[in-house]
Amino acid sequence: MNMNDLKRQYAEKFLSLNWLRPEIALAQSVSSLLTRGQLCGKKMLEIGCGNGNFTFLTVGGLFNFDYDLYLNADINGFYEGRDIYNVFEPEKAAFIKKKPSYTFKIGLDKKEALVKQADQLSLYETTLIDDFTETCAIGDNSCDVIYSNIFHWLSSPFKALKKAAGFLVSGGKIILTFPNPNIYIYWPSCNKKNEDNKIWQMINRHRSKDIKWTMSYHGFKEGLEASNNDLRIIDFKTWLKPHQSILWDIGLRPLSVPLIKMSQKLSGTDRTEIKKDFVATILPYLNELIDDEFRSADQGCMNFIVLQKN
């Protein structure tokens, strides 16, 4: 499949999952297209697997059209920054249309309800409820690929990297995605100039407080070398360019609660019909935004880094 067809395929399946939040579909489609070629190991570990949906779709899985994030979302606490998707979905496995092409040896996350969701995807041989602290024990030299998009939620990233490197076989890879300082320029709700602005505070919903750090390529490289990790950088890209970043920061975020509430009150038939119209309307815009993301020479606000163990 050529890259254009692949972009269309990923846009459609991520939009189907996130149809009420197309800005999430945009970010996840781009991240997935960058990541997919790296997730083909035989003994893979995901740190911060969450509900597993992103990785499931990235490695070739597919849900039925009727499944999406909003079927069982609990909207209580949304405006206070609560994770409204941290709920158990007992029938999630029934919505799987195609199993993933690759599987992971282990998926771990600190949220029990999300891990129970991930358990149903035929994606992880084993799941662990863990926040990747000192107590986490995977086993030295037991993994050939480690993937994580949550390292910016950890206070000591290089300490965590050193620990992760111990799990890798020689030549094994760690794939990371994390924000760089451009988020404070590209995301209006994170821009220091707007920190006292009530509108941007409402849109941000405490999200910026979850980001423990951001790092440029050079800052990361220096930190990696100073920490004596047995790792070297073999690939680096930035993604989520300026236009895409603004859309990600705002999008339909302010309307999440009424849109989700509406979708949960519709009959099954009406919901499917409206969702089809919604996806068909947004998909052309999403496709163009993804094309623009890969055409643009601008620096993004997210880093994609591949490390290899010596």
Image (tube, grey):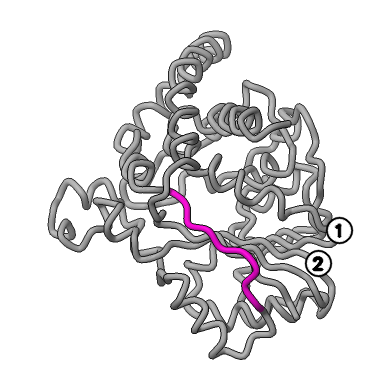
- Residue at position x 43%, y 49% from top? 240
Q: CA distance from mark 2 to mark 1?
A: 7 Å
Question: SS at mark 2?
Answer: strand
Q: Position of residue 79 (x, y in %)?
A: 31, 46
Residue 144's disc is: 2
Residue 109 to residue 274: above or below: below
Type of amino acid at the residue the image marks with label 2: Asp
Type of amino acid at the residue the image marks with label 1: Lys
Q: Which residues are magenta?
A: 232-240
Q: Position of residue 229 (x, y in %)?
A: 64, 85
Residue 284's disc is: none
User: Picture quarter containing residue 166?
Assistant: bottom right
Marks 2/1 in contact by CB < 8 Å: the verdict is yes
Q: Position of residue 292 (x, y in %)?
A: 44, 37
- Residue at position x 63%, y 48% from top? 51
Q: Is residue 55 left or right of residue 241?
A: right
- Residue at position x 82%, y 77% from top? 170
**Residue 255 among magenta residues:** no
